[in-house]
Image: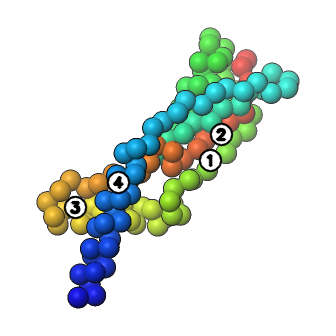
Amino acid sequence: MKTFNRTTTLIVTLAAMLALSACQSTTSSPVIQRPNSIYETTGIAESKVKAKQNAINSAKKTCRSKQVIVVNDKTTYNGILNERADRMVGQMGAIVGSVLGNPSPDLSRDDDYEYMINFRCQ
């Protein structure tokens, strides 16, 4: 009986997380000009790689034909749990989904990762 309640609670929690993540939308980040020809922008996405690519694309758009020189950068994880626990919950969801015959749920949100860069155009 205890295992059934834990399994039910897990499934309900995963379903709620999936439903809430569907309501999220990706917002475009503005580029802010700082002193000394330095710009700042933040890429936001469900993975580190996509967040970095979003920030770099925004920087390239600002610099146009000039080269983007990253002065400094910082990656931040904003998931519900810590990064490792979030991964484990995703794997558990995939297992539950495969047992129930459903495709594995995607628990990542569009804003799990932020990649902030300061850059200049050269």
Image quadrant occupied by the C terminus: top right
* Mark identifier at residue 116: 2
- Badge 4 marks a residue whose secondary structure is helix
User: Quadrant of residue 38 in the image?
Assistant: top right
Residue 49 appears in the figure: no
User: Residue drawn at (35%, 59%), measured in percent from left and top?
Assistant: 16
* Mark identifier at residue 97: 3
Residue 101 appears in the figure: yes
Q: Are marks 1 and 2 in contact (CB under 8 Å)?
A: yes
* Mark identifier at residue 34: none
Labels 3, 4: front one: 4
Residue type at mark 2 is: Met
Q: Is residue 92 above or below residue 37?
A: below
* Mark identifier at residue 75: 1
Q: Report the side of 99 relative to 29 (left or right).
A: left
Estimate the x, y position of residue 27 in percent, counting from the top left.
Answer: 52, 33
Labels 3, 1: front one: 3
Residue type at mark 1 is: Thr
Residue type at mark 4 is: Leu
Q: Earlier in the sequence, mark 4 or mark 1?
A: 4
Q: Are marks 3 and 1 in contact (CB under 8 Å)?
A: no
Disc 4 target residue: 18
Residue found farthest to the bottom:
1
The span from disc 4 to disc 1 (Cα, nearest Å) is 24 Å
Residue type at mark 3 is: Gly
